[in-house]
Image (tube, rainbow, N blue to C red):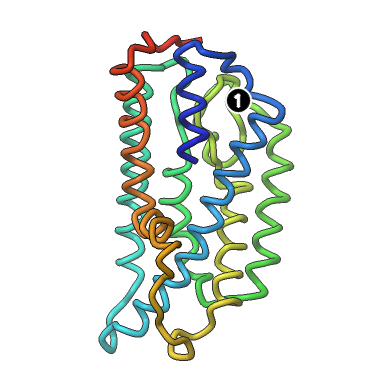
Amino acid sequence: MVLYHFSYDLAYFGLFDVGFFRNGVGLDLGRLIGGTFVFLAGLSLTLSYRRAVASRSPGQGLFRKYLWRGLRIFSYGMAITFVTWLFVPGEMIFFGILHLIGVSIVLAYPFLVLKLPNVALGFGCIALGLYLNDFSAAHPWLAWLGIRPNSFMLDYWPIFPWFGVTLLGVFVGNALYGEPSKRTPHSSPAAGRPLAFLGRYSLPVYLVHQPVLLAALILLGFGDVRIP
């Protein structure tokens, strides 16, 4: 993800054609990387849920925990919407990957105890997204559903089909990890600890890496950002 965004930043600084990322291999690569991010968000939800169930007090509800977590991540997405409205209004992000993950955390709550039903629901969401992809609208108000507005967005991850990918991640998490009481905790091998660190702090890394990359490019004298 970081390398992909770094390449995108180089294109915005005019080092090569930014159009590479808007169709063909460049677009597909971005979808693959982001789709992995969404899938792992669903898988991680199962681990979080199991820990929360194991540690909660009797009668303590969990929905509020996931509601506030989802709202917090969605608010980060809205902050990105505001920043893109200020600096790239012609390509403003109406519903990006953080919007999607924030909403998915809340929507996925009833499905965190399910296994095989999530496969059917996941592929159903994907199929609906593929159907909605044939439609477009002059305004962005239905972009969150998967009806693409006529304008280009730097980051676009609608609920359909991508909530389906989250549900597939939930299925895999439940299928692979089972009950936490049956697993023996173990530390990460030394060679994998940097990756474990990035996985544990993926949200801060996601929020911080772009400003850091852009600042580094500016300090290195690559010039002004070119807005296509």
> Badge 1 local density, few (<14 within 10 Å), some, or many (20+)?
some
Disc count in the image?
A: 1
Q: Splitting the image into 4 quarters, where does residue 136 fall?
A: top right
User: In the rendering, at what x and y percent does residue 52 appear?
Assistant: 34, 77
In the image, residue 190 above or below residue 28: below
Q: Splitting the image into 4 quarters, where does residue 217 fall?
A: top left
Residue 85 placement, left or right of 123:
left
Residue ID at (30%, 58%) = 68
218 vs 50, nearest the viewer = 218
In the image, residue 148 above or below residue 227: below
Residue ID at (47%, 71%) = 46
Local SS, label 1: helix
Residue 72 placement, left or right of 191:
left
Residue 197 placement, left or right of 9:
left
Residue projecting furthest to the front: 191
In the image, residue 205 above or below residue 41: above
Q: Splitting the image into 4 quarters, where does residue 114 fall?
A: bottom right
Residue ID at (31%, 77%) = 61
In the image, residue 14 above or below residue 94: above
Residue 205 placement, left or right of 153:
left
163 vs 189, nearest the viewer = 189
Residue that carries the numbered disc 1 in the rendered image: 21
Residue kind at label 1, given as amino acid type: Phe
190 vs 52, nearest the viewer = 190
User: In the rendering, at what x and y percent does residue 164 appear?
Assistant: 62, 55
Residue ID at (70%, 66%) = 120
